[in-house]
Amino acid sequence: MNSGGEDIVKGRTALPVLVLWVCAVAHAAGDTADTRLLDELAADQAKSSIAVADKIWQLAELGYLETESSATLQRYLGDAGFKVVAGVADIPTAFVATYKSAPKSAGTGPTIGILAEFDALPGLSQQALPYRAPQVTGGAGHACGHHLFGAASASAGIVLARWLEENSVPVTIKVFGTPAEEGGSGKVYMARAGLFADVDVVLHWHPASGNSASPSTTTANKSGRFTFSGRAAHAASAPDQGRSALDGVEAMNFMVNMMREHVPQTSRIHYVITDGGDAPNIVPEQAQVYYYVRHPKADVVEELFERVVVAARAAAMGTETEVDVEVMHGNYPVLPNHTLAKLVYDNMVDIGGITYTAAENEFAQQIRQTLIQPMAPLGSQEHIGRFQFRQSMGSTDVGDVSWQVPTVGFSTATWVPGTPAHSWQAVAAGGMSIGHKGLHMATRVLARTAVDLIRRPDLIQAAHEEFERARGADFQYAALLGDRDPPLDYRK
């Protein structure tokens, strides 16, 4: 996120003249009947969407285990008139909730998709307090704010359904309940199953420590678990009779770490040893290491992952062990769409940033004392980041969706400025009013953007033309994770 004054604007006053003109054209000074109605409907949903978010925050369920979190969102949407189909793409917690308008005019109209995540992260349980205080020691926590993500997306879907009741236009709204974003690639299995084939545009958002709608991309990512098998023996009295699976893991790690000198600079390779044996006096019969490989290009990720596999096989050969390779997940980089991003940006600027109360400022100041060199100043949550292309080194399964249908995302300030994702500080802010304000802002941005697209089919056409140019005429989608089944037990 940008923190310099030249990179941010508050409302419209700091925008260049050209951008001001575009905003005025798009929103007629923000006072159209549509805008007023959407804001009223979003305000009506605020209390219930916060209740949904807080419940999912308390549940803090891990990927593919989000049974109650998914059910909570399904009930919320079902009670609002959406037809909910659960268990899609062979994933029990995945769902598609559909609302079709009943227009007086003929035609089917566009289909607008909205993504909704809801999985937590392991080991980051935290109360809504500005100091480290787990709710459950060693428990999970919403350190990436997916409880807010899911609740705001569902709330925006309901706002749009209510808007359609007041406007006789043919439209289909689909809210996609997408589990296990954190390493489980839930959206990839949904994309592979063709669930986005009939969608014209997909909208999504993400919690953050600032507000941004810049067109951005991510790294492609492929991960695997490398399980080595050896022979157990007494490590002191009969070491010659053993073959250490842990030796295989360590030999592999050594070779991959040497490989880092000979990979493209924008690559990322990281790992954890998930099983190192049971006791020092037993030659480990089994050991396992879990690797992530990233790069901005999907084909480079494939090449790098295969080099890691070669190192694993060489390690097994050299230690007289065996290795089994299980691909765990794979994500494409996000394909940015500038046409859609500019539309979202205009809406964010029109809405403006987030203002803290005195109590929220005090909470934020205490949180910032626990951070190491926060990169954004307190108060930056009131602004919208400059519109400029961004390359993220993180990865998301939204990438696979974005290569199948024009897709746009944005972030709102649900955390204290400077807070990193995947931290207890993010969990804390996401469980109180600071997170709730970011949720409400996201609901409004999603709803306004969807209505702009409904009212302006030329924007959808322009987004599709850009999408086709960016993909290339010869593009054929093939999931990086292959034809494996969803790893429903990867968090057990």
Image (cartoon, grey):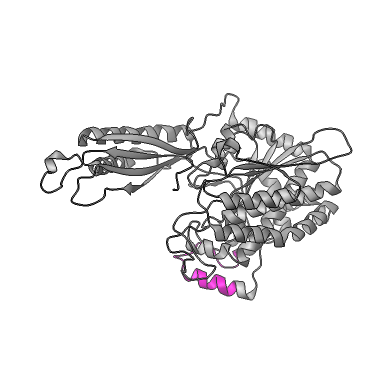
Q: How many numbered dots are placed on residues in this image?
A: 0
Q: Is residue 132 above or below residue 322?
A: below
In this image, 48 relative to 292: left or right? right
Residue found 34% across the figure and 36% down from its top: 308
- Residue 249 figure quarter: top left
Q: Residue furthest left?
A: 237
Q: Is residue 48 magenta?
A: no
Residue 427 x, y percent position in the rendering: 53, 62
Is residue 370 visible from the viewing direction of this image? yes
Residue found 58% across the figure and 36% down from its top: 89
- Residue 37 figure quarter: bottom right
Is residue 13 visible from the viewing direction of this image? no
Taking depth in this image into account, of 4 and 82 the one nearest to the observer is 82
Q: Which residues are magenta?
A: 361-380
Residue 19 x, y percent position in the rendering: 72, 51
Taking depth in this image into account, of 209 and 136 the one nearest to the observer is 136
Q: Is residue 370 magenta?
A: yes
Taking depth in this image into account, of 315 and 255 the one nearest to the observer is 315
Residue 83 x, y percent position in the rendering: 72, 42
Q: Is residue 102 above or below residue 23?
A: above
Q: Residue furthest top?
A: 474
Residue 147 x, y percent position in the rendering: 59, 55
Residue found 29% across the figure and 43% down from its top: 287
For the N terminus, give its image quadrant.
bottom right
